[in-house]
Amino acid sequence: MRLAAAAATLILAALPARAASALEPPDLSRYLDWGFVHARPGFAVPGIGYDSNIFAPSGQPPVGDFAVRLSPRIEGVVLFGRRAFLTFTERFDYTAYQDYHDANYYENRGAARLTIPVRRFGVYAEYGLNRLKDLPLSEIDSRPIRREVRTGAGVILELGWRTSVEFGLVRSDWTITDSDTPATAPSQDRIEEGRQLRVRYRMTGITDLTFDTLNRTVNFVDSRQAFRDADERALLPGVEIGSGGVLSGALRVGPARLDAWDPEQPDFSGLIGNARLAWRISSASTLRFEGLREVGFAIYQSNSYFVRNNGEARLVHYFNRVFGVDGALGRGLLTFPESPQAGARTDHLRRLDLGLRIRLMENQLGRRVEYNVGLSRQSRDSTIDTLDQTRNVVAVGASVGF
């Protein structure tokens, strides 16, 4: 669970083209015409190489193996005349290992939204299905399957003066399963439901001021986990800057609160937010920054919640139209406050990436063919010594987008 999950569904990066209004479909020039479906497919091989620590074991020697990860994806628009339109995204990831076949896994991320506009008024319905099995940041040596079914519905109002408002109801049903600990994981099943409000004001052709609010409850299905039930609230003002200028991306930050129903459990009150910004230093160099501060529930920790702070800066430089290099430095802090069920825990996270890029094609619509060779080193330094770990990955990859 993320305290601002509903606000985060607003994509935290400026798209190459945006609709002038939430009551209008996206710019179709970005998509391929497949009859009544306008699609934008893509395929990536994020890495073919060696991973020195595939299980991230706790207090045990790491195990390495050769691995490949495949990631087909698609986004699209379906028009129903002038009466309605449907937007959707789908991404499928599959990771396979050379020797440890039992560790192979797949993930799926999908979302769709149907909008029915009537002049300056409209209604919408949303549906999302996510199946995640990558190693959760809050966990060590465990890849539980986290399945989320997300639904929502609401209204859209164009108020004039470049201002629009969305108000809706949201619900997420989480189911956690793990073949290694079948009796433990289901105790983390939960339902998150409540209300969200989104206000957007267009300052210029590519810049929007935004204001997101969230108010909902979290109920665990297992009555033995009732001590973790909570109310969550967040206020996130922000800004979105589209492509075309020196600076692009989005930033949201604001106060949030997590109130546990059990008075013996710790509460959270503070700032959360997320950012993804790109600064085009020159035609050949771009500096990107990603930042995140979030609150969520651990899967197997007895703590009521964890707080994650993470920041990463990445510099990409092309020597010519084909060859380029990139490097990234990331730092993070993961904290678990002390609760009656467990002691406090703090993890310091570090990441270093170095790589070579070969770009064969790219156009203004973002369609590209690119290959890369890279080295990544990740480390965790925890107050619990048995949780310390390092991970080195050497891999080649490719990305093809249409």
Image (cartoon, rainbow, N blue to C red):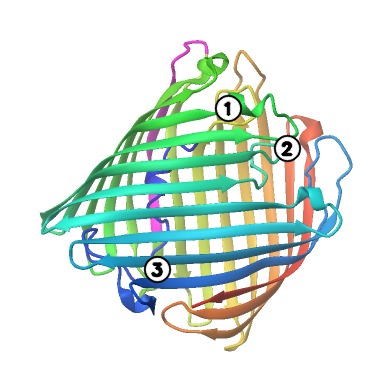
Judging by the rendered image, the residue that carries numbered circle 3 is 247
10 Å crowding of disc 2: few (<14), some (14-19), many (20+): some
263 falls in the magenta region = yes
Q: Earlier in the sequence, mark 2 or mark 3?
A: 2
Q: Under tag 2, what secondary structure?
A: loop
Q: Under tag 3, what secondary structure?
A: strand
Q: Distance from label 3 to label 1 (Cα)?
A: 41 Å
Judging by the rendered image, the residue that carries numbered circle 1 is 188
Q: Position of residue 308 (x, y in %)?
A: 56, 39
Q: Distance from label 2 to label 3 (Cα)?
A: 37 Å
Asked if residue 226 is positioned above or below residue 310 in the image, the reply reads above
Q: Under tag 1, what secondary structure?
A: helix
Front one among 268 and 401: 401
10 Å crowding of disc 3: few (<14), some (14-19), many (20+): some
Judging by the rendered image, the residue that carries numbered circle 2 is 140
Residue 53 visible, this orientation: no
Q: Amino acid at mark 1?
A: Gln
